[in-house]
Structures are given as structure tokens and as C-alpha cells.
């Protein structure tokens, strides 16, 4: 299980780095899904992208993995309003050419990512939690690779 967990750490680390970079290269997408009540859209898009890159790098190394995983954990919670806005805004659906159902399907996938970040923050977990995390990893990654 330790080798599998390490593989999931590296895959998610690369995923977070990739998504973080996309905040700089495809910021138009992130501006569209930003809720109106959040000020300084571009600043927060760049900040969250930078943090995703940093935390993604941090989980690669055992010495910083705890802090990187907790950073990802809290970052996923902080960006959740953008996913809610993506679901609720018909204007965003039209601009991105997605349906409300597509946006709805995306919402619950934040939960397995949060669980995986917690799993990665701990050096050891219960057998049940290891199995649960290992099982949710594959469908979560498959879903996000299809976005």
C-alpha cells in the first residue's frame, strides 16, 4: 500500500502543478467561474495557481509533504465557491458550453480530493482509510483527466 500511496502522491502532485500553471496560461477560464462577490479576480486566480504549484511540489518531498497536503486540503475548500458558481450560473454554462448537469457532477469530486489530501498528510492511516483512499483515487483521477 505504501508504494501505491506514493504513486498517488506523485500523480496528484503533477496534477496540482499542471492546474496551477493553467491559472497563468488559461486564466480566462478561471475568471469566468469566479463568483462576483470575490474581489480582485485576477489576483486571486494567480495566487491560487501559485499555491497549487507550491503545494504540489511540497507533497513530492517527505519533509514537506505534511504541510503541502494540508495546504491543498484548505485550498480545495477555499476554491469551492468557484465550483458552486460554475454550477449555479447559466451565463457560465453558456460561455463554457457545458450543461448544469456537467457542472453538478464536478461538485462532489472535490470531496475525494480533500480526502486524498488528508490521506497524503499522514504517514500512516488505518487500514480502512487506506483502502477507501486507494479506491477513490482511480475514479477521481479518471474523471479529472476527462475534463
Image (cartoon, rainbow, N blue to C red):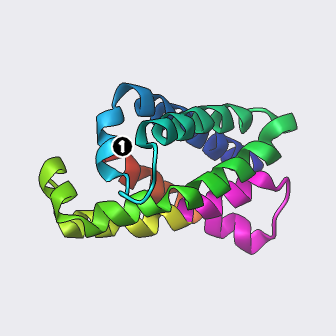
The residue nearer to you, when weighing 106 against 145, is: 106
Q: Residue at x 87, y 36 (%)?
A: 63
The answer to whether residue 8 is above or below residue 90 is above
Q: Residue at x 17, y 64 (%)?
A: 90
Decide if residue 116 is on the left or right side of residue 36.
right
| Residue underneath mark 1 | 30
SS state under label 1: helix
Q: Quadrant of residue 14?
A: top right
Q: Is residue 24 visible?
A: yes
The answer to whether residue 10 is above or below residue 146 is above
Residue 115 lies in the magenta-colored region: yes
The x and y percentages for residue 48 are 54, 41
Q: Residues within 10 Å of mark 1 (few under 14, many from 20)?
A: some
Q: Is residue 134 visible?
A: no
Q: Residue at x 37, y 58 (%)?
A: 35
The answer to whether residue 132 is above or below residue 38 is below
Q: Residue at x 37, y 55 (%)?
A: 143
* Main SS category, magenta section: helix
Q: Which residues are magenta?
A: 112-133
The x and y percentages for residue 13 are 61, 37
Decide if residue 93 is on the left or right side of residue 134.
left
The x and y percentages for residue 33 are 33, 52
The x and y percentages for residue 62 are 83, 37
Total marks drawn? 1
Residue 114 lies in the magenta-colored region: yes
Decide if residue 48 is on the left or right side of residue 143.
right
The residue nearer to you, when weighing 35 against 126, is: 35
Amino acid at each position: 500500500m505504501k508504494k501505491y500511496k506514493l504513486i498517488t502522491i506523485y500523480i496528484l502532485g503533477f496534477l496540482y502543478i499542471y492546474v496551477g500553471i493553467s491559472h497563468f496560461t488559461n486564466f480566462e477560464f478561471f475568471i469566468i467561474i469566479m463568483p462576483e462577490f470575490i474581489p480582485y479576480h485576477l489576483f486571486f486566480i494567480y495566487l491560487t495557481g501559485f499555491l497549487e504549484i507550491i503545494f504540489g511540489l511540497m507533497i513530492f518531498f517527505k519533509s514537506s509533504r505534511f504541510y503541502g497536503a494540508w495546504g491543498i486540503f484548505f485550498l480545495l475548500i477555499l476554491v469551492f465557491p468557484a465550483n458552486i458558481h460554475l454550477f449555479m450560473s447559466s451565463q457560465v454554462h453558456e460561455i463554457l458550453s457545458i450543461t448544469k448537469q456537467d457542472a453538478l457532477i464536478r461538485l462532489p469530486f472535490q470531496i475525494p480530493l480533500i480526502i486524498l489530501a488528508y490521506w497524503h498528510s499522514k504517514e500512516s492511516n488505518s487500514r480502512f482509510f487506506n483502502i477507501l483512499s486507494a479506491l477513490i483515487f482511480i475514479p477521481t483521477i479518471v474523471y479529472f483527466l476527462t475534463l
